């Protein structure tokens, strides 16, 4: 992963050869805590998130990027993709502590 350093939020990540920018924005009016925009090579995360919620949301959106880059998102469709990325992000966040803040 690129962009990880102590005291700084993750600002970009290389996913299977493509670098995605990560920005922290106000998503309080949105119906989610994060979003993945493959066409813009961008991940948005709600700026108010911290700790466990930040880790889980960031992993969730990164897994969307993995699914897109590997073409698995086309194979499984949007509903199953959402289940898979949420399952992976929840499992990893619940079992390991990632310093992604």
Image (cartoon, rainbow, N blue to C red):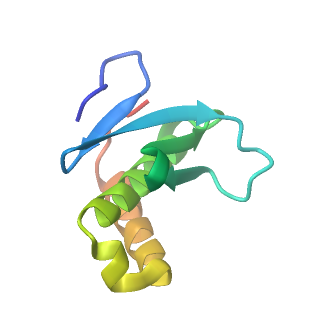
Apparent side of residue 37 relative to residue 14 in the rendered image (left or right): right
- The answer to whether one can see residue 94 in this image is no
Q: Residue furthest top?
A: 7
- The answer to whether one can see residue 58 in this image is yes
Foreground: 8 or 3? 3
Apparent side of residue 1 relative to residue 8 in the rendered image (left or right): left
Q: Residue furthest left?
A: 17
* Residue under the image location 36 percent in, 32 percent down: 12
Q: Position of residue 63 (x, y in %)?
A: 35, 58
Foreground: 66 or 71? 71
* Residue under the image location 34 percent in, 64 percent down: 68
73 in relation to 96, above or below: below
Q: Position of residue 93 (x, y in %)?
A: 37, 52
* Residue under the image location 28 percent in, 48 percent down: 96
13 in relation to 80, above or below: above
Location of the N terminus (image quadrant): top left
Apparent side of residue 78 relative to residue 34 in the rendered image (left or right): left
Apparent side of residue 12 relative to residue 86 in the rendered image (left or right): left
Location of the C terminus (image quadrant): top left
Q: Residue furthest front?
A: 39
Q: Position of residue 45 (x, y in %)?
A: 56, 41
């Amino acid at each position: 992963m690129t962009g990880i350093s102590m005291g700084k939020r993750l600002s970009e990540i290389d996913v299977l050869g493509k670098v995605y920018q990560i920005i922290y924005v106000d998503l309080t009016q949105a119906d989610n805590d994060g979003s993945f925009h493959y066409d813009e090579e961008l991940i948005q995360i709600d700026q108010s998130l911290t700790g466990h919620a930040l880790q889980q949301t960031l992993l969730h959106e990164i897994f969307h990027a993995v699914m897109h880059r590997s073409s698995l998102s086309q194979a499984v469709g949007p509903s199953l993709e959402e289940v898979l990325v949420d399952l992976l992000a929840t499992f990893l966040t619940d079992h390991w502590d990632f310093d992604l803040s």
